[in-house]
Image: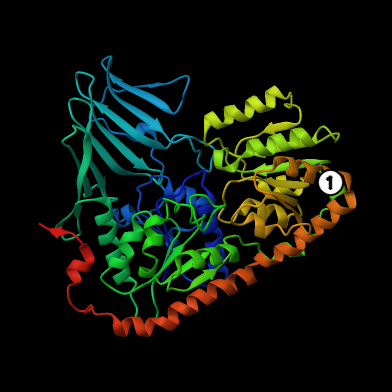
Amino acid sequence: MIFFLNANFSFQNSGIEHAQVKRAMLFKKFNKDYKFIFHDWNPLLHHYLSNSGIEDINILNMFDYFQKSISVKDNIISYKDIDFGISNVNYEINIFNTNNINVTSNNKIIGKINLFKDKDEHGNSGRVKSVELFDDFGNLYRVNYYDYRGFLSMSQLYTPDNNISTEIWYDINGVPVVEDFFKYNNNNDLLKSGWRIIDSNKQFHFYESMTDMIRGFLNIINLEYFSIDKPNIYIMDRSDKYEEVLPELCSPLYSVFHLHNSQSGNAQKPMTSIMNNNYEYSITNTNSYDAVVTATEKQKNDFFNRFRPEVPIFTIPVGIIKNDHFNNKEIPMDKRKENSIVVTARISPEKQIDQIVMAVIKANKFLDNISLDVYGYVNDKEYMNKINKIVKDNDAGNIIKFHGYSKDVKSIHKNSQIYAIASSMEGFNLSLMEAQSEGDVGITYDTNYGPNELIQNKINGFVVKYGDYNALAESIVKLFKDHDLLQKMSSESYNLSKRYSEDNVWKKWKTLIDDAYMKWPLKLKSYNHNLNNGLQDMEHGGNDD
């Protein structure tokens, strides 16, 4: 089995999650089994993944596993289905927020019901998200949380001073199976102090931390899917907690350290900058894994030249374009919004959208009818305020628009002419690849990694000196004043996108998978652990009571 490792999955995801979903679709096309592994509890996990085309059979969440809720038939629990143990109950729906309902009895509040904001397939909102319970004095003593699929999933128990003392997770029959505990440390901070798993034999297994519990969980999973004939392959898309656990599992596996971003804190100084703190542990311990994956050849070379790992490095693009996409007709530049520039990215300082804004403002002095449309959720309000001030100070509100997050970026790219990037660092940039596949011409700083490889300078766009927004402005003016050049580069964008077709990317994944299979017999032979002994330790990884 091939596992994609992550912490969580939400409604608004980053490029890593989008890359995982695209990879999943690729593996499905080529009939390769895979599963997502997540270690965070999320009552909306299956709902969000289903909306992205991922089925329950491909989802393996740690809490789902212990809760025996990997696959659950959908069930809608409405607010009137909640039993408060008394008959005289009144419901007061908040007129300002219909997803909040106060529950009273004899003019005394006994609870609050919170509903999921999502609507079901019939267009009716009303699935219960959580229920707050109050004692006779109006003090909160318990909050019950429900999975979106329709069952009680977790409860938080509160102390008299309104702090969480214990959290309890249940199986689908309401039986407690996971607990964590809180206690005060020497600084009087209330922190989690341990976890307890109750297995199907009603045996208790204790873990000191979430990392210990993940280790125990992966030991079970690796053994369940273990095969003499083929390796379990673990791809660390997000390394947190997994990075120290994978090398310590009790049975053999093939582990992959996937770099989705720059390995250095300053991507423009890959040989001298401090390491990216998100990858520092993994980089330091690279040789404890079986392979490294980078999205571009330039990053592969930089990583090797600086760190000299002994394990192989594979270059595999994180972006994938369906084969049949290339059967679509190209949309000419004169059939798109004239002099249009687009950005689809979160509003965050490292994206440096303010510099694109300044480039467009400068280009506007030499062009008529220019526009910049930015689509993406605001990740940093202070940074958004900075951009708004630039727009206001330059009276550019008529040419620069912000539209928020959009899931229909394909239509946006089809109607745009230029896609702009000014990021301080990238791992690849899926949005740019998708825009190019729709014929958008790219302009970018010479940013590591991705933009300066996706865009081939003066062929399908322009790569300018890093930090030179005046050069970005000059590129905009040059393209919009030379329609033949704009059209020629658009055609090259379509053509060069074939580098990321399903067939081409699958060939690269197959090379890594073949490496895992080739090394598997030697791994089994050299592995010192006796798989027939110590099974209980491998299954639980903690201290038994």
Q: Residue at x 85, y 47 (%)?
A: 335
Asked whether 229 or 48 is in front, the reply is 229
In this view, which residue lies farthest toward the front?
A: 272
Q: Is residue 495 above or below residue 508?
A: above
Q: Residue 353 at what x, y percent from top left? A: 63, 38
Q: Residue 453 at what x, y percent from top left? A: 66, 60
Residue 202 visible in the snapshot: no
Secondary element at tag 1: helix
Q: Quadrant of the C terminus?
A: bottom left
Location of residue 88 by image quarter:
top left
Q: Residue at x 29, y 36 (%)?
A: 144
Q: Residue at x 35, y 69 (%)?
A: 288
Q: Label 1 belongs to which residue? A: 478
Asked whether 346 or 120 is in front, the reply is 346
Q: Is residue 287 above or below residue 50?
A: below
Asked whether 237 or 472 is in front, the reply is 472
* Circle 1 Cα neighbour tier, 10 Å, few/some/many (<14 / 14–19 / ≥20): some
What colour scheme does the image use?
Answer: rainbow
Residue 430 visible in the snapshot: yes
Q: Amino acid at mark 1?
A: Lys
Q: Residue 474 at what x, y percent from top left? A: 79, 43
Q: Is residue 130 above or below residue 12?
A: above
Q: Is residue 532 above or below residue 84?
A: below
Q: In the displayed structure, does residue 532 sit left or right of residue 502?
A: left
Location of residue 240 by image quarter:
bottom left
Q: In the displayed structure, does residue 430 sit left or right of residue 117?
A: right
In this view, which residue lies farthest toward the top?
A: 107
Q: How many marks?
A: 1
Q: Quadrant of the N terminus?
A: bottom left
